[in-house]
Amino acid sequence: MTTSHSIAGALLYVRLTTIKGWFASRLRRLKQPKYLVGGVIGVVYIYSFFIRNLTQNGRGPWAATPTEAMPLIAEIGAAALLVMIAVNWILPRGRAGLAFSEAEISFLFPAPIKRSTLIHYRLLGTLTTLVLTSLFMTLVSGGWAISGSSAWLRAAAWWVVLGTVSLHFTATSFVVTRLLDRGVTSLARGALGIAVLVVAIGVPIVWTLMSLPAPTQEDLAGFPQIAHYAEAALQSGPLPWLLAVPKLVIAPMFAADARAFALALWPALLVLAAHYAWVLFSAVSFEEASIARAEKRATKLAAFRAGNLRTTALKKLRDPFKLRDSGRPETAFLWKNLVAMGRLFTPRSALVAAAIVAAACLWLVTAELRGGQAFVGVAATVLLPIVLFFGPMFARQDLRSDLKNADILKTYPLDGATIVFGEMLAPIAVLSAITWLALLAVTIVGPGDQIPAYVRLLGALAIGVCTPFFCALQLVIHNGIALTFPAWVQSVSNQGEHGLDVLGQRLLFFAGLILLLALGLLPAALGAVVTFFAVSWLVGPIVAALLAWLVVLTILGVEIGAGVRWLGERFARFDLSSELRP
Amino acid sequence: MIEVTGLSKVFGTFTAVRDLSFAVRPGEVLGLVGPNGAGKTTTLRAIAGIIPPTTGQVRLADHDLLTDPVQAKRALAFFTDEPRLFDYLTVRQHLNFVARIYAVADHEAIAMPLLEELEIADRVESLPAELSRGMKQKLAIACGLLHSPQVLMFDEPLTGLDPLGIRRMKDSILKRAKAGAAIILSSHLLHLLEEVCSHVLILKRGEKIADGTLAEIRARFGNGDANANLEEVFIRATGGSE
C-alpha cells in the first residue's frame, strides 16, 4: 500500500525535477550562439529598463505621490479587485478543470493517489509558478512601486494577490461545475450571478450615492480635494464592508515598511488559506475538464511549434480563381495562399472593393462633402504607410507559414527560387491591392484646389507600381530571416516560448529587420536621387523624376531577383528538423 | 529506377548514414528495414531530395538528383509517415494544386478514380481537420500518385490505416510495381514487407548490413532455414538489439 508520505515525496520529486530540468534546458541552449546572444541582449534590456530603475529609485514616479493619497489608491485597488472577481462570477465558463499537463494526466490520474492529493499537487504547483510571475510583476512595476517596502516584500505582496485571485477563480469554476451538475444552465447561472451582484454590490453603491452629499465646487477644486471626496465616498455606507476582504488581500502592497508589511501579511495569508481550503473541500469532478484543457493546450502548443498560429477551427474556403492544370507553377502557390487568406481575398472581391471605393469617393466629391472627403483622405493616407511597412510582418501566408510543409514542397519538381517566389505572391498581391484601394481613394478625394488631378494621378501611379516591389523586398527579408534562423523565427512567433534569451531574440529580430530594410532601400534611394539631380538640368524635373522612378524600380527588381535566387538556394539546402535540433 | 552510390549524411559530428549504395530497378519493391535510429528516414529524405546528402550520388529515373533535381523529382512521389497536408485546402483543392505543380492535364479524370480506389471520393470537399488520420494518409497518397510517378518512396505507409486500408495499400503498391515503378518501402511491419517486397536492405547505425532478394537474405541470415521469416532474419542480422 502506497503511503501518502511517499506519494507526496514522489509528487514533490516530479515538481522539483521539472523545474530543475526547465532551468537546465534553458542553460544548455545558451551554449548555442543564437540563444546566448539573445540571452545577453535580454539581460541587458531587463537591467536597463527594469532593474536599474528598481535599484535607483524604489518608488519611481510615484515617489511624488503624497502619502495621503495612499489610502485612496488602496481603496481603488480593492474596488478593482472586487470588480474583477464579480465579472468572473458573471461571465460564462465551462466545467472546472485544473491545469495539469498531458504527462501529469497520463501518470497521475490512473495512479493510486487521492483526489485531494492531486488538488494539493496542482494548487501548490500553481502557487509555485506564481513566484516567478510575482518576481516579474515586481520588476515590471518597479517604476511605479507605491509602497516604501523592499522589492522582495513587494514580490511577496504580488504573490499573495495573484495566488488569492488564482484560487478564487478555481473555486468559482468549482462552484459553477456544481451548479451545472445540478442542472443549472450557464444562462441561468449568469442571471443568478447578476441578481446576486446587484443585491450585494449594486445596492450598497446606490445606498452610498444616495447618502453621500453631492460634490461641491470645493470638492472638485483640485486633485487632493477630489481624492479626499472619492475616499469619503468609498468609506461611507456599506461599501467599506464590501471592500473589506479585497482590502485585506492588497494591504501588503501598500505597507510602508517591513513591520507594516508583516502586520498586513497575516490577514492576507488567512484569506489565501481560506480560498485554498475552499478549493480543496469542493467535492466536484475536475478530471474530464482537466483532460480537455490539457489536450487543448497541447494542441495549441503543437500548432505554435509548427509555426501555425491559427488554432481555431478552419472554414472551407472557395477558390479565389480557377486554377488550370497548366501554366506557371508560381500561380499555384498564389492560389493556395489566397485560399488560406480567406474569402475576402479574391480578384473579384478586389474589383468589387475598388468599385465601391471609387463610387463612394466620387459621390463625396460630386456632393461636395468636404468633411467626408477630408476624413477619407486622411484615413487612406494613414492606412498607406501602415500597410506598406507593417503589412509584410502580418501577412505571413508565404514560406513562414509553410515551413512545416517544407519536406513536401521540396519533393516538388520545382527549383527553390520558384517555390520561394510563388509563396511570396499572395501577400504581395493582397498588400498591393489594399494599397491601391487607399491610393484610389486619395487620388479621388485629394485636395483638388492644391494639387492638380493629373499630378495626383501620376503620383498614385508611381507609388502604385512601386508597391509590389516594396512589399516583395520586405517579404524577401522576412522569408530570408525565416530560412536563415528558423529556430529564431519559431521562437519569436511561438507564444509558448518564454525566457530572457527569447526576449533578446525578439529585440534582435526586429532590429535586424529594420536594418536590412534600410540597407535594401538605400541603393534605390541613392540611385533615384543621383539620377534626378544628374539629369533634371538636362531634361527637366518631370522627365528626371520619371527616370529616377525607373531607376528605383530597376534597383528594387534586381535586389528582389537576387534575394529570391539566394532564398531558393537556401531553401534547397534547408532542413527544418536539423535546424531546430537543440 | 533508383540508383544510390556512396550516400552519406552527417549532422554535425553524428553520421546518420554512411557510404550507402544500392539500386532499385523498375518493377522492384525494396524493403528498407532497420532498428530505430538506423538511418532509414534520413536515407529516404536524402533520396527524395529533401535534405542534401553530405556525399554520394542519387539518380532517379536516369536523372541526377543533385545536378538535375527538377527532372529527377518529376518522376518521384514521397510519402511521409505523418501525412503533410495544407490545413486550409480541401481534398479537391489539394489535388487541384498538385495537378498544377506537376502539370497533370485533365487531372479530374485521374483524380476521381484514385479517390475512389482509396475510398475517399465522398470527402472531396473536406478539410484535413475533418479527416481521420487514415483518410489524411489516403489523401497524401492520392496527391502523390496523381502524376503517375515512376519512383515511389513510402516511409511507414500503413500507420493509421484500418485493415481494409492496409490491404488496399498493399495491392496498390504491388499494382504500381507491376506497372514498372521502382519502389522503396520503409517499415517496421516486417510481415508487410515480406508480402510486398521483392528485395530487402537492412540498415544498422547508418550502415548497410545486407541487401538482396528475400531469398538471398534468408540464405545469408536464416541459419540454413529456407523458410525463416523476415522477423527472424532481421533479429539475427541486427544482432537482436538496437
Image (cartoon, coloured by chain):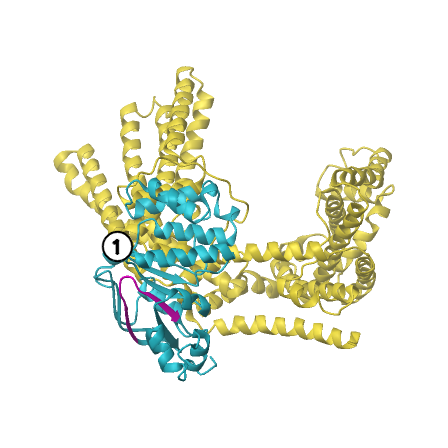
Chain colours: A yellow, B cyan
Q: Which quarter of the picture shows residue A215?
A: top right
Q: Which quarter of the picture shows residue A326?
A: top left
| Residue A475 placement (x, y as % from top left) | 35, 49
Task: Specify start and end residues of the magenta stretch as a single range.
Answer: B20-32
Q: Which residue is depicted at the point 38% across and 70% down?
A: B32
Classify mark 1: helix, strand or loop: helix
Please tell me whether residue B31 belongs to the stretch shown in magenta: yes
- Main SS category, magenta section: strand
* Pick the front one: B201 or A394: B201
| Residue behind mark 1 | A565
Q: Considering only vertical position in the picture, is B230 above or below B89?
A: below
Side (left or right) of A455 relative to B159: left
For disc 1, the neighbor class at 10 Å (few under 14, some 14 to 19, many from 20) is some
Q: Which residue is depicted at the point 77% across and 42% down?
A: A230
Q: Which residue is depicted at the point 31% across and 35% down?
A: A464
Q: Which residue is depicted at the point 56% across and 54% down?
A: A300
Residue pushed farthest top? Answer: A367
Give the residue type at disc 1: Arg
| Residue B194 placement (x, y as % from top left) | 41, 68
| Residue B69 placement (x, y as % from top left) | 25, 59
